[in-house]
Amino acid sequence: MYIENFKLRELPFRLSPDPQFLYLSRAHARAKAYMESTIWFTDGFVVVTGEIGSGKTTLIESFLRQLDSDVVIAQINQTQVSAVEFLQSVLVQFGFSPFKMKKAELIATLNSFLIEQYAAGRKVLLIIDEAQNLTLKVLEEIRLLSGIEATKEKVLRIILAGQPELNEKLDSPELVQLAQRIRLRFHLGALSREDVRSYVRHRLDIAGADGREIFAEDTYPEIFRFAGGVPRLVNTLCDTAMMAAFNEDRDYVTPKDIASAVGELQWVEFASRTMAMAAKVANGAQQAGDRPTRVLSKLVLSLDGKAVAELHLLPGRKVIGRTPDNDLQIDSKFISRHHCQFVTGSDGLTVIEDLNSTNGILVRGKRVRRHSLRDGDVVTIGQHEIRYIDEHSGHLTDTHDDLPRVDVDAANEDADEDASSGDAAGAR
């Protein structure tokens, strides 16, 4: 193993979550602060989302290590369960053997336990990882649990962590009551170029580098280029590159080692890989007989009254901010790294959410945290304006075909244009 070659105490880039190696980027620090707030406030719960490999589980483990002894914890990681199985899993975490209980007994037992813990001066925390897999019925059970009170104070603190699909599920019409109980939401985006460099050096120092420069300075742009700022991918690439350097009998990593690792992993640039995966999903859906994915709406970005970019919205989430890892980058000092997100449901409805930006978002001149958009709404962020256009509303507006389109699946572009032409020749 290469540990001795690089004079390290342990492997720096293991894929298993290890709180000791947690790198607190600005975003990770804020997400952790939101988790910590659940201990002090009981009005609602916290939702933290992030792409696969963004560090959610490591963040949770680090948070749990720092809790006081008066906090009773139930941590659920297996989320592909029924409502009854979920309640049983929670009770097991609290020391019960509930497998012969019926649902009514499960709920009664859990209620009694929560009230008893509150009376004893203990705080009860429920953390659910991979929450995007929870069914609507299980999420409704969570809403009911979140409402349990003792002397007008909630007795259960809840943290939901999951992939971005969790936000889509929480925004569904069936869960409007649950969404109203959410106090804080935060999305963990990819690391920036600067953060990737700091992340790699941080993990090396924890492993025993003690400030030694093991990775050459010109390796970091290549790491970002192929790993895209996703911590898990950075770990994989750096570990493979260190093995390549070890095989060359060197105690430092060069761009040549990064290239060798990329070849061994059979990777392409992160941006290209992401686009290819999206195209594969779209093609798979069409081969399965599904209708082609259609653009539901679009955003037109303007500065000083002049349109500068356009972003088509498909079902899912689009993040807008200052750094390159956003779906739409706005290079302005008035824009936060991850400023806001647009979440579009399968029904075509789009919601804009402020991602705790410094300067906020304004709709019709009023600052909002979350707002359901209607055709023609204008969102102001910093010095820019974003006009929301519902493609199915019959809204007559300049299509801005001369503008650069951002993040549009090339495989669907022709179909979208044909559909738009059909709409123009029809009902309009």
Image (cartoon, grey):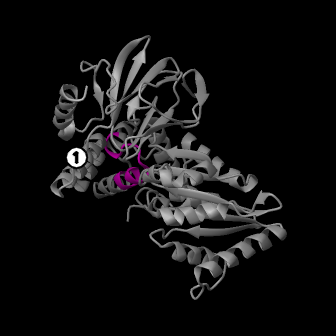
Residue 285, x across and y down, in percent: 22, 54
- The residue under label 1 is 279
Measured along the vertical axis of the image, is residue 33 above or below residue 1? above
Residue 60 or residue 373, whichever sits in front: 373
Residue at image x 84%, y 69%?
Answer: 119
- The reply, left or right, for residue 167 in relation to residue 283 is right
Residue 106, x across and y down, in percent: 63, 79
Magenta-drawn segment: 225-237
- Look at label 1 and name its amino acid: Ala
The total number of labels drawn is 1
Residue 108 or residue 206, whichever sits in front: 108
- Image quarter hosting the N terminus: bottom left
Q: How crowded is mark 1: few (under 14 residues within 10 Å), some or many (20 or more)?
A: some
Residue at image x 69%, y 77%?
Answer: 108
Measured along the vertical axis of the image, is residue 117 above or below residue 176? below
- Image quarter hosting the C terminus: top left
**Residue 176 in sight here:** yes
Residue 200, x across and y down, in percent: 46, 47
Which element carries disc 1, helix, strand or loop?
A: helix
Residue 232 in the magenta stretch? The answer is yes
Residue at image x 33%, y 52%?
Answer: 241
Residue 46, x across and y down, in percent: 61, 52
Q: Is the magenta region chiefly helix, strand or loop?
A: helix
Residue at image x 46%, y 57%?
Answer: 12
Residue 226 in the magenta stretch? The answer is yes
Residue 17 or residue 399, whichever sits in front: 399
**Residue 359 in sight here:** no
